[in-house]
Amino acid sequence: MAKVSSKTPSKAAGAAKSKTAKAPSKSPRKKKVKAEAGSVGLTAAECSEGALSTEMKQLAAAIGSAGGVVLASYREPLGGYWVTLAALPIDRVAPTPYQRELSKTHADKLATVIPKVGRFLDPIIAVQDGDRFITPNGMHRLSALTQLGAKTVIALVLPEPEIAFRILALNTEKAHTLRDKAMEVIRMARALAESAPSKTEQDMAFELEQPGYITLGICYERNSRFSGGAYQSVVARCDEFASKPIATSLAVREARAARLIELDEAVAAAVTRLKDAGFNSGYLKPIVVARINPLRFVKPGAVDAKPDFDRTLDKMIDGARKFDASNVRAQDVALAASMGGSEE
């Protein structure tokens, strides 16, 4: 005799359906459209075609006035923009004023390598700046050539001064630390506030890369030993590019930087309490920051709006001031060390 199901037909059917139903498949990632080979940009012959614009003629005159020589002018093959290859007196070229500090070690290494080749084969990029030229990507090569006593540097000179900001954002000549990048971005923001006062942070988002870099850069200006890495994730969660002119938004960021420094001082005091309690480790600051972070249990994207910067900092500062070292155990410190979090 067949066994009769105790479930009603509708329930039985539903149970059967739930067993056979497949979980909804994830939507496939959109594949990047790959251009057909040989379909983009100019042909080799086209790179030399066309009459020079008035702008390019003026650039050639400026190069000559600076004591330089135009070696060639051509249209670069991807976008078709005009570029001048020039020999420039090395004393008329300087790094952009908003770059990070020179790494003497890196410059010395280049000064050792270049003579072994016996040739300088890596032109810098330069744009006009008054009666001289500035480079967004050649600071270390300039320093190395100066050490070697060179008279001239070869440069790809671009007629658009604003391109220096974009090239700086793409600079991979030497890996940046967080401090390097933040200092570079805040200097860039200050330069933009003067040279292009109507530009907003949103307008320059590509060049500035991340909004948090601007705020952290101000912190490093005020304290070169600031522990930016300890707070970078929190700042990134709360910060966004402003729609107001950079000259105006910098005042807001100055205030935010002051709050971060206040937080860092409160965290440093909590770390001192941990040390007084017998803990001695390079991972104490990350432990404090992790425990006072009100966003640690909130998944990114879980809410539509970004967390409010000031309210988040208020909670963290209050948490740091009330931090109880007796709640930390030795295994907590060991765990932090195993996860690799450390003070900057």
Image (cartoon, grey):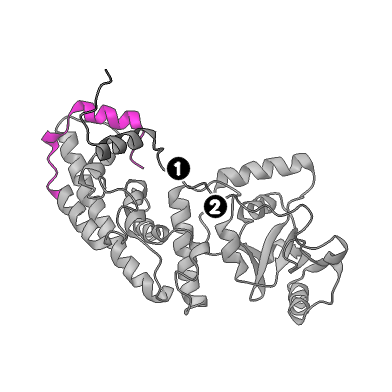
Answer with the quarter of the image where residue 289 lies. Answer: top left
Name above or below for residue 241 compared with residue 325: below
Are dots 2 and 1 in contact, CB under 8 Å?
A: no
Q: Is residue 162 magenta?
A: no
Q: Which residue is mark 2?
A: 102
**Residue placed most toward the observer, 109 or 189:** 189
Q: Looking at numbered disc 1 in the image, what kind of residue is underneath it?
A: Ser
Q: Position of residue 286 (x, y in %)?
A: 28, 40
- Quarter of the picture containing the C terminus is top left
Question: Residue at point 25% right, 60% down?
Answer: 259
Q: Nearer the N terminus, badge 2 or badge 1?
A: 1
When asked about the image quadrant of residue 57, the answer is bottom right
Q: Is residue 16 left or right of residue 97?
A: left
- In the visual, does 58 lie left or right of 172? right
The image quadrant that residue 303 belongs to is: bottom left
Q: Is residue 329 within the magenta segment?
A: yes
Disc number lying in front (2 or 1): 1
In this rendered view, identify the residue nearer to me: 223 or 325. Answer: 325
Work out whether 50 lies above or below 40.
below
Residue identified by numbered label 1 = 25
The magenta segment:
321-344
Graded by Cα atoms within 10 Å as few (under 14), some (14 to 19) or many (20 or more), the crowding at tag 1 reads few
Nearer to the camera, 32 or 311: 32
Q: What x and y, as percent, mark residue 109? A: 63, 41
